[in-house]
Image: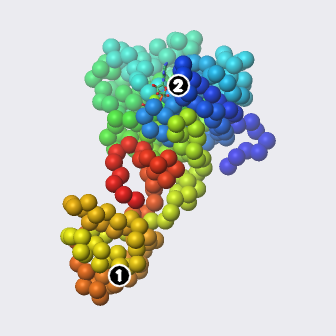
């Protein structure tokens, strides 16, 4: 999808940033083609917000060659600002104002004529399914509605490039999906470029054309979700047994030595597998033949969690017992 002769919407080469002694970005490279969604994935404190703040001109980098919207990030800061919209990690919505007033205010801040601001506000309320709630104070909005309003406010001024810093953190799965659809719509209908940060692998998987995994100041992998998934060993079937004897008997019968958990409470074995019904049946037949009782099983196909664990040696967030 890369447009050969056009400059990328965002490019960074050797982007560096430290706060005092603490190196947050240790020379990262980013290229985002126009009209695509790029996701920066990383755990708390990885440097996601710092990257967004630098690329959206809120703070200065210590080094690197950066261009946004075709403009030099240092020499042409005003031009960059005119080309972008930003939804920060923390909401920019004024809760005392109504949804409509928040949008009109954004228009005023961008020096749009009053009539134009009002028309735009009405359009955006409609588009983001907030028309009915438009004249209520934002303090009465649900988390999902507030996030939608935040996103709508980002679009005032018609930015070509939008930065979304953790746009769905804290939302329930349904509201999250609504936001994903809205973001996809922006890219498909308006050819907007989206730079998105997230801690959710599923979000990156669903939305992003390309994903970069940020860990301890460096991008440790970059590619499409499918490419990243190819970096990790294949899937497996996790078998659960009642006791150690059954576990060891199964490991012997199946000739598997890795992926064993034997910790007094849990007796499980991870058997490499493509997860197909055929392989599952063969596995169970074998255990049946050896008269080994299986208490439970789970089929596990590789996901971005596995990618993260493999690349960084630690899980993204919650516990992940074995792999
Ligand atoms: N102004 C600042 N002064 C000093 N340290 C800072 C400053 N801003 C960020 N940091 C540090 O830089 C690191 C990266 O922070 P950043 O906010 O970019 O992470 P993040 O990936 O956005 O995390 P989260 O997922 O929690 O939002 C953290 O260790 C943070 O404490
Ligand atoms: Mg952040």
Position of residue 194 in the picture relative to residue 175 (left or right): right
Across and down, in percent, residue 168 comes to 40, 36
Q: Is mark 1 within 8 Å of ligand 1?
A: no
Disc count in the image?
A: 2
Pick out the residue farthest to the right: 5
Across and down, in percent, residue 296 comes to 25, 69
- Write down the residue under mark 2: 22
User: Residue 178 sits in which quadrant?
Assistant: top left
Across and down, in percent, residue 169 comes to 38, 35
The colour scheme of the drawn protein is rainbow
Q: First in sequence, mark 1 or 2: give its number.
A: 2
Q: Is mark 2 within 8 Å of ligand 1?
A: yes
Distance from label 1 to label 2 (Cα)?
Answer: 51 Å
Instruction: Please rate how many residues cluster around mark 2, counting C-alpha atoms within 10 Å: few if below 14, some from 14 to 19, many from 20.
Output: few
Q: Which mark is residue 8?
A: none
The answer to whether one can see residue 103 in this image is yes
The answer to whether one can see residue 125 in this image is no
Position of residue 45 in the picture relative to residue 98 (left or right): right
Q: Residue 253 carries which label?
A: 1
Position of residue 222 in the picture relative to residue 207 (left or right): right
Q: Which residue is drawn at 67% across and 24% down?
A: 63
Q: Is mark 2 on a helix, strand or loop?
A: strand
Q: Which residue is drawn at 70% across and 37% down?
A: 8
User: Residue 125 sits in which quadrant?
Assistant: top left
The quarter in which the C terminus is drawn is bottom left
Q: Which residue is drawn at 44% across and 38% down?
A: 43
Relative depth, front residue between 96 and 39: 39
Labels 1 and 2 touching (C-beta < 8 A)? no
Q: Is mark 1 on a helix, strand or loop?
A: helix
Across and down, in percent, residue 99 comes to 38, 21
């Amino acid at each position: 999808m890369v447009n050969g002769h056009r400059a990328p919407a965002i490019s960074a080469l050797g982007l560096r940033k430290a706060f005092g002694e603490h190196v947050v970005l240790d020379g990262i490279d980013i290229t985002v083609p126009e009209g695509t969604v790029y996701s920066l994935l990383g755990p708390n404190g990885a440097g996601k917000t710092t990257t967004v703040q630098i690329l959206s001109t809120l703070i200065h980098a210590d080094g690197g060659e950066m261009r946004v919207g075709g403009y030099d990030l240092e020499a042409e800061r005003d031009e960059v600002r005119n080309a972008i919209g930003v939804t920060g990690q923390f909401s920019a919505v004024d809760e005392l104002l109504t949804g409509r007033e928040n949008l009109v205010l954004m228009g005023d801040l961008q020096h749009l004529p009053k009539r134009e601001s009002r028309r735009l506000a009405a359009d955006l309320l409609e588009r983001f399914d907030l028309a009915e709630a438009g004249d209520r104070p934002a303090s009465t909005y649900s988390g999902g509605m507030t996030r939608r309003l935040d996103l709508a406010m980002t679009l005032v001024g018609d930015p070509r490039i939008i930065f979304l810093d953790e746009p769905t953190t804290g939302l329930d799965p349904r509201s999250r999906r609504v936001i994903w659809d809205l973001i996809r719509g922006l890219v498909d209908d308006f050819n907007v470029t989206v730079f998105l940060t997230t801690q959710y692998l599923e979000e990156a998987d669903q939305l992003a054309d390309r994903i970069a995994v940020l860990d301890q100041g460096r991008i440790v992998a970059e590619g499409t979700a499918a490419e990243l998934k190819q970096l990790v060993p294949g899937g497996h079937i996790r078998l659960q047994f009642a006791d150690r004897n059954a576990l060891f008997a199964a490991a012997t019968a199946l000739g598997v030595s890795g992926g064993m958990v034997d910790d007094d409470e849990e007796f499980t074995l991870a058997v490499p597998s493509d997860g197909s019904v055929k392989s599952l049946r063969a596995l169970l037949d074998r255990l049946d033949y050896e008269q080994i009782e299986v208490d439970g099983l789970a089929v596990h196909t590789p996901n971005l969690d596995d990618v993260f664990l493999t690349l960084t040696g630690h899980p993204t967030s919650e516990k992940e017992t074995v792999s």
